[in-house]
Image (cartoon, helix red, strand yellow):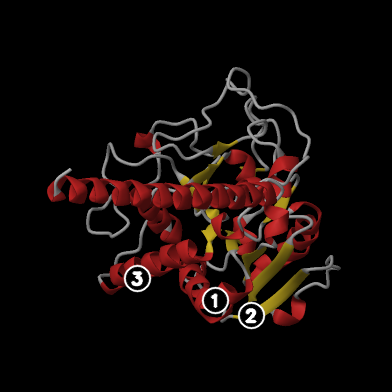
Amino acid sequence: MDLLTVKVLTVLLLSALLLGVLYSYISQTHRFVSFQLQDVIADTRSAEVHPDSHGLHLVAPEHVRYKQPSIMQGRTDVVSVTPWLAPIVWEGTFNPVLLDSIYKPQNISIAATVFAVGKYIMFLKNFLETAEQHFFVGFKVHIYVFTDRPKEVPQVKMAADRQLTVRSVPSSNRWQEISARRMELIQTLIEQTAHSDADYIFCLDVDSQFHGRWGTESLGGLVAVIHPGYYRDDRSRFPYERRPQSRAYVAPGEGDFYYCGGAFGGLMQEVHLLAKTCRFNFEADAKENIEAAWQEESHLNRYMWLNKPSKVLSPEYLWQDFKSRNPEIHIIRFSGVVKNYAEIRPNA
């Protein structure tokens, strides 16, 4: 055997030996990692909920029993989703037990604003008492009352984790000015206090009362309520601001639904942006001696047309007491009470 052959054989033997050692190492490492992964999987089978994922999807606790969902049965008399795929909330489209079990562990808190200026203070007691019975019962709630008559705010017994704060505002000789200033005051409230006190905020009319559950089914990024007076109408009949000079302008043939100015809400940052934008546009209009047809409601509708709400609440969430209930309205949750505007509005 010549010297070259010996060298080749030596190299081959050393290579084979090295490969054998390497294979043994890789095999042992693989088994070790596999055992570790099995342990991790076993540990996480009973801990599949990740707190940092709550903002991305809804997390339900184990063993909550509720009726099996169906995509074949349900409400067929109404539309329950918008063209941009936002849910439209009607009675019979959600499970309250399931939703509450999802949101309760998150320890969320809800703020609500209500304006009781001038003679509108007469509606506050009924609003607060019915809110105690129906509005986010069992959750942390902070109601902010804006009024020019703080001494007349009624004493209403509130459940644990529910509180009321009174904020003084000036009175006005024009109800339109009272209405218009709401966006400014909501913006300021969120900037000063509410953003650190609550996760969600709803802005509601005081001349209204609760009749049924208003709860976690209403939560969303930006939440609008369809006006009960126009939900069956063609949009050509909606009372949008039709003057192009106004920043609340919605052109003929445009718009989605007509939304209430008396009930809207969502996440703090979303409502803050809405209020800030509507206030800016309203004040810019005022400098040019333009007042939109329905003040802040007109500007809200313009905003909601361009910035689609992520959840839409059906007219159940702000019905009108003077209207008879239509067949598709299975429940009235919140409604505007019957009133004489000539008696309560300063310039009616």
Q: Is residue 276 above or below residue 5?
A: below
Rendered-image quadrant of the N terminus: top left
Count the labels in the image.
3
The residue lying at 40 percent from left, 40 percent from top is 238
Mark 1 Cα-neighbour bin, 10 Å: few <14, some 14–19, many ≥20: some
Name the one closer to the observer, 324 or 335.
335
Name the one closer to the observer, 44 or 158.
44
Residue 48 appearing in the image: no
Identify the element where label 3 is drawn. Answer: helix
Q: Residue furthest top?
A: 72
Mark 2 Cα-neighbour bin, 10 Å: few <14, some 14–19, many ≥20: some
Q: Report the Cα–Cα distance between label 2 and label 1.
A: 10 Å
Q: Nearer the viewer, mark 2 or mark 1?
A: 1
Q: Earlier in the sequence, mark 3 or mark 1?
A: 1
**In the rendered structure, which amino acid carries the disc numbered 1?**
Leu
- Asked if marks 3 and 1 touch (Cβ < 8 Å), the reply is no
- Asked if marks 3 and 2 touch (Cβ < 8 Å), the reply is no
Give the side of residue 93 with respect to residue 246, left or right: right
Q: Give the image location of residue 176, x and y in percent.
A: 47, 65
Q: Earlier in the sequence, mark 3 or mark 2?
A: 2
Residue under pointer 3: 280
Residue under pointer 2: 167
Residue under pointer 1: 189
Q: Give the image location of residue 13, x and y in percent.
A: 31, 47
The residue lying at 53 percent from left, 39 percent from top is 229
**In the rendered structure, which amino acid carries the disc numbered 3?**
Phe
Q: Report the Cα–Cα distance between label 3 and label 1.
A: 16 Å
**In the rendered structure, which amino acid carries the disc numbered 2?**
Arg
Residue 92 appearing in the image: yes
Q: Report the Cα–Cα distance between label 3 and label 2.
A: 22 Å
Give the side of residue 62 with respect to residue 273, left or right: right
